[in-house]
Amino acid sequence: MIRSHSFRPFLPVLALALLGLAGPAPADDETCVAFSVSGTAVSVGGDGHDFELAAEGVASPGGAFNGTIVGHTNKKTSVQHAVITLEFDNGDTLTFDTKIKPDEATGAYSGTYAISGGTGAFEGARGTGELLADPAGGTFSMDGTICQ
């Protein structure tokens, strides 16, 4: 006897799961705006798998910042996971979880970020976007949205 399996009963569940991955919709009293970062980073430690960088630059909104980038490289896939913390001149902070991987042709890294926390004016902030990093030049940029 040949049995046929259909995925149709699972489509609503799959659709709901995918919508959940996109994150919750903004609350009615929440405002989302464009968010961008331009900065430079230099190595301050690491062992080939784990790394720590010191960063500085400008974010909009936010202004000038100093920060840290602490992460780990998966040597088999070259995928890097890191936590970026930006501290602004007024003491407010923003923290991001990131995942980037290299472009074999250019050596630049690209990937995504998600805002995972903040203090001061950024308390309760969330958002997502894209991250680009050029290790050769020590530069990075982030573009997306921030919601509060």
Image (cartoon, rainbow, N blue to C red):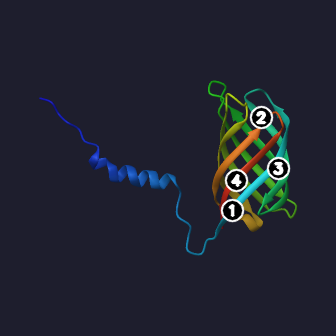
Q: On residue 100, which mark appears?
A: none
Which numbered disc flags the more N-terminal residue, 3 or 2?
A: 2
Residue 110: x %, y % from top left? 67, 40
For label 3, the residue is 67
For label 1, the residue is 34
Mark 3–mark 2 Cα distance, whole angstroms, equals 14 Å
Q: Are marks 2 and 4 in contact (CB under 8 Å)?
A: no
Mark 1–mark 4 Cα distance, whole angstroms, equals 8 Å
Badge 3 marks a residue whose secondary structure is strand
Badge 1 marks a residue whose secondary structure is strand
Residue 95: x %, y % from top left? 72, 53
- Other residues around mark 4 within 10 Å, as few (<14) / some (14–19) / many (≥20): some
The C terminus is located in which quarter? bottom right
Which tag is nearer the camera, tag 2 or tag 4?
Answer: 4
Mark 2–mark 1 Cα distance, whole angstroms, equals 29 Å
For label 4, the residue is 143
Q: Residue furthest top?
A: 76
For label 2, the residue is 51
- Other residues around mark 3 within 10 Å, as few (<14) / some (14–19) / many (≥20): many
Which numbered disc flags the more N-terminal residue, 3 or 1?
A: 1
| Residue 143 in the image: above or below residue 51 | below
Q: Is residue 76 left or right of residue 89?
A: left
Badge 4 marks a residue whose secondary structure is strand
The N terminus is located in which quarter? top left
| Residue 22 in the image: above or below residue 83 | below
